[in-house]
Amino acid sequence: MNAEIIAVGSEMLTPQRVDTNSLYLTDQLNAYGVEVVFKCIVGDDRTLLTDTIRLAISRSEIVILTGGLGPTEDDVTRDAVAQALGVQQTYQPEVFENIVAMFSRLGRKIADNNKRQAMLIDGAEWLENTRGTAPGQWLRTKHGVLMLLPGPPKELTTMYEREVRDRLVAMLPKQALRTRWYRVAGMGESDLDQLIAPVYTRYSNPVTTVLAKAGDIEVHLRARLETPEAAEILVEEVGLQVEALLGDRIYSRNGDPLDRTVGGMLVARGQMVAVAESCTGGLLGARLTEAPGASDWFSGGYLVYSLEMKKALVGEADGAEIEAHGVVSERTAALLAQAAAKKSGATHGVSITGVAGPDGGTAENPVGTVWIGVASDQGVETRRYRFPGDRGRIRTLAAQSALDLLRRHLLVQKG
Amino acid sequence: MNAEIIAVGSEMLTPQRVDTNSLYLTDQLNAYGVEVVFKCIVGDDRTLLTDTIRLAISRSEIVILTGGLGPTEDDVTRDAVAQALGVQQTYQPEVFENIVAMFSRLGRKIADNNKRQAMLIDGAEWLENTRGTAPGQWLRTKHGVLMLLPGPPKELTTMYEREVRDRLVAMLPKQALRTRWYRVAGMGESDLDQLIAPVYTRYSNPVTTVLAKAGDIEVHLRARLETPEAAEILVEEVGLQVEALLGDRIYSRNGDPLDRTVGGMLVARGQMVAVAESCTGGLLGARLTEAPGASDWFSGGYLVYSLEMKKALVGEADGAEIEAHGVVSERTAALLAQAAAKKSGATHGVSITGVAGPDGGTAENPVGTVWIGVASDQGVETRRYRFPGDRGRIRTLAAQSALDLLRRHLLVQKG
């Protein structure tokens, strides 16, 4: 079953405001297998809102309006809904009494225009508002239901829980939702899509979504069937095929970000990591300490931005090595990773040295060239990357790739 | 003139995602007197999207679509626009060559489905994407213009600034715009608003916008009048009053972020900074190296996450001091800042040590308590902060406050 959410209010169309009510409602609706297919924000414009409501009820079973239930002239939701449905509104004195009572409880003087809030759309049921003055309304439509909810989040969530949820569940076909959520590192979005599209395009259920951030891709599968068991069997059938294709590029099945995954692997092995960062200037350390409890896997590290700092970290002899091979080189990455582990006493050292740009590129090492090293008692692993994009993207991809190289190192290490 | 913004992508209809692109675009459009009257989010549903586009172009002069320009089957924006306008798309080999070039620069293999990104809607102009592979498109419609922009915020903002803004201004009624842009650190949004509202509320022109991120507030003034001279006089009149109220809490008048401002101050003084970070784990170093040329002001630093790393940085004797005073203490902040400068040879050392949480809080140092130190030949400055919010916000505020404390130290330092 499909739902649409319409937020009403010109203030919601300013550069500062986001519609958080729709996030709450989407979460609630998804839990019952209802998909939100469209959501929008309309200003205090009766005509535009009326058209929007007409369209919504013509194509979706559940239409939720939030906001615009106040007493003033520019609170147009009630009027627009009545107009869209071609019905009248009737003044309900006993509801106005409640509003009066609420006002006096708040020690506020009621204005005559508050009577507008006591206008009930013909055919609607009241939804009680225990946190504010604007009652909501619940209406059957040709294809389903339409509801008017207040804009203030506290009033909306309370009204949803007390008045809406049960009414909604009662009208829903029993449907169970089962999901899979894979997070993938080390490949591009289009490569991943080419790899798994042959599988997921064969199924309209589960629904597959692919989300890509820099060096980080999420694959979501959502299966809906009559029973939890049937939905689980279906999502498992497709999920296993996707897992087989992605293999160890999947770093998380529970939504954990890469840093938390790596942290968990280190903790499970009773190991710690230290970093030596040049072009990322601390991004890798910041990633490794994003999750609470980072002190269980992260000892610390060295921001070796200048040549002097690099030499100071590795010591006299290896310092000469760095000058000989150049700061952006396999040898330097190896020496920095080893020194980070040795000097900090951590079991693993990870290093990043490269050209983030926009300047400093050479024929041999153009902008985007980054060497990453991982050192442990299993030896040193180094890899050369060539990252696209601007300085910010190159640095983000470098930190992400360093986490993934460490993850792969931990996957294969013996003992 | 009216605008509508349509965000495309099923992932944007999940409970976790908000459409921040529309906030940026609204801010940009408002600056030129364009009002956003409707915005919506549509999933990867070609039919629904086509209907939405038809409606938008029928009632608004400016229609902006964001997202859905990727290479995969569920990137439906191009097809939906072509269908809504009743026109064809043509494959542009030379554009595909650019995409191929971008991929090979990244050393990545291009997938055949990337050809979809080189399909130009008949009558459209390309909008170059310098940050990603999906080019945008610009189309004249019966009532105005329609544009297709990429979903990733960095790609969108860059494309807007490079390709869209001038085209847009050219079609808007001529009006001179003069602006002031202040960036402010070290105060909360509501404090700032209380301080300057008495000034800006007296003027409907210039339009004043206050944008707040963690520890970082932007104040925009936009004056619109017939001539540049008149607009300049007006924005200057209001700007001077705002500057007088905010004083040295204004760190930038040209939009430079705090890290670049501090970097510029250091370069102007021929000085360098090094960091010693505990709870921020590298965030401060990452901030100080965001801008190109960071090697002119940043030497490097030390991620002293564990007690051992802290002791190793300050040495035997001071290590005992740290144990005596505790890691979250004024003394420790001072010792770490001094050691960071001394050991790296930088003129300035900045330290951060605190409780980012969610665990580790004590009665004396509850979660959010952070000590920041700045050391130079002028002596050591320390300050205790108590930051609100979750771990992520506390860490962000700590790095931002450290940059600001360094800025103030540089402002007042002698010789």
Image: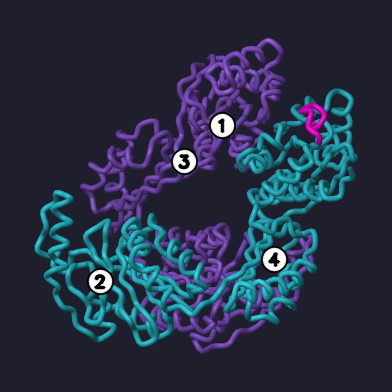
Chain colours: A cyan, B purple
Q: Which mark is residue A141?
A: none
Seen from this angle, which residue lies furthest top? B317
Q: Are marks 1 and 3 on the same chain?
A: yes
Kind of residue at disc 2: Trp
Q: Nearer the viewer, mark 1 or mark 3?
A: 1
**Residue at the image point whose x is 48% and y is 62% from the top:** B19
Please give the residue where the numbered disc 1 appears in the rendered image.
Answer: B360
Picture quadrant of residue A110: bottom left
Q: Nearer the viewer, mark 1 or mark 4?
A: 1
Asked if the residue at tag 2 contacts the one at tag 4, i.e. Cβ–Cβ closer than 8 Å, the answer is no
Q: Earlier in the sequence, mark 4 or mark 2?
A: 2
> From the viewer's perspective, is A360 left or right of B240?
right
SS at badge 4: helix
Magenta span: helix, strand or loop, mainly? Answer: helix
Query: Of B366 and B42, which appears nearest the observer?
Result: B366
**Residue B384 in the image, given as x and y percentages of width and height:** 47, 24
SS at badge 3: loop
Q: Are marks 2 and 3 on the same chain?
A: no
**Residue A169 in the image, given as x and y percentages of width and height:** 43, 73
Q: CA distance from mark 4 to mark 2?
A: 48 Å
Please give the residue where the numbered disc 3 appears in the rendered image.
Answer: B389
Kind of residue at disc 1: Gly
Residue range in magenta is A340-347
Q: CA distance from mark 2 to mark 3?
A: 37 Å
